[in-house]
Amino acid sequence: MKSFLQQAKELDLGAEILSIESPEFETDEVSLKLMEGMWYVAPADVCRSFADSYHEKYNVEPGMATGNIYDAIMLIVEAAEKYGPDRDSIRVGLENIKEFSGALGSYSSGPEGIFQVPAAVKMVKNGKFIFVE
């Protein structure tokens, strides 16, 4: 995200930046300044402790997709532990997950196996991630 925003600033695009990815793990001063005014759709309940633990272990902030990847892997692990490690058991397990607490919020498997996470429209204002009402 930071590279894209730096390029947009250098080109003086003058356009509002909208995103479907949550930038809430990118909290360094440069990123926050570049994201000022940006609107995005994000999980409503991002788990800050995930980002803190990641930073403590790797000494960098997690990237935009890090939480998604972590949650995807942990959902598969959860399904395999509860239902078995074979493909069919994992599929059944994923179909039955309810209120799984992940890095990006609480996941539940919905109709047709699509995971649902409460989402919100947010923006970066004065260096803070705020809900748009």
Image (cartoon, rainbow, N blue to C red):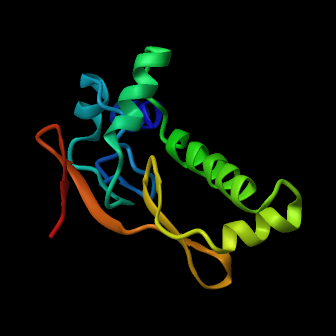
Q: Quadrant of the C terminus?
A: bottom left
Q: Position of residue 29 (x, y in %)?
A: 24, 24
Q: Position of residue 61 (x, y in %)?
A: 41, 26
Q: Judge from the rendering whether residue 73 lies leftward or rightward of residue 35; answer left or right.
A: right
Establish if 64 lies above or below 27. Answer: below
State which quadrant residue 97 falls in.
bottom right
Q: Position of residue 105 (x, y in %)?
A: 40, 56
Residue drawn at 29 percent across, 65 percent down: 121
State which quadrant residue 59 falls in.
top left
Q: Nearer the viewer, residue 54 or 123?
A: 54
Is residue 11 visible in the rendered structure shown here?
no
Q: Judge from the rendering whether residue 14 lies leftward or rightward of residue 115; answer left or right.
A: left
Q: Quadrant of the N terminus?
A: top left
Residue drawn at 28 percent across, 34 percent down: 34
Establish if 30 lies above or below 115. Answer: above
The image shows a total of numbered marks equal to 0
Q: Position of residue 12 (x, y in %)?
A: 32, 39
Residue pushed farthest bottom? 111
Is residue 96 visible in the rendered structure shown here?
yes
Q: Nearer the viewer, residue 84 or 55?
A: 84
Residue drawn at 81 percent across, 58 percent down: 84
State which quadrant residue 96 falls in.
bottom right
Q: Nearer the viewer, residue 27 or 104?
A: 104
Q: Nearer the viewer, residue 31 or 114?
A: 114
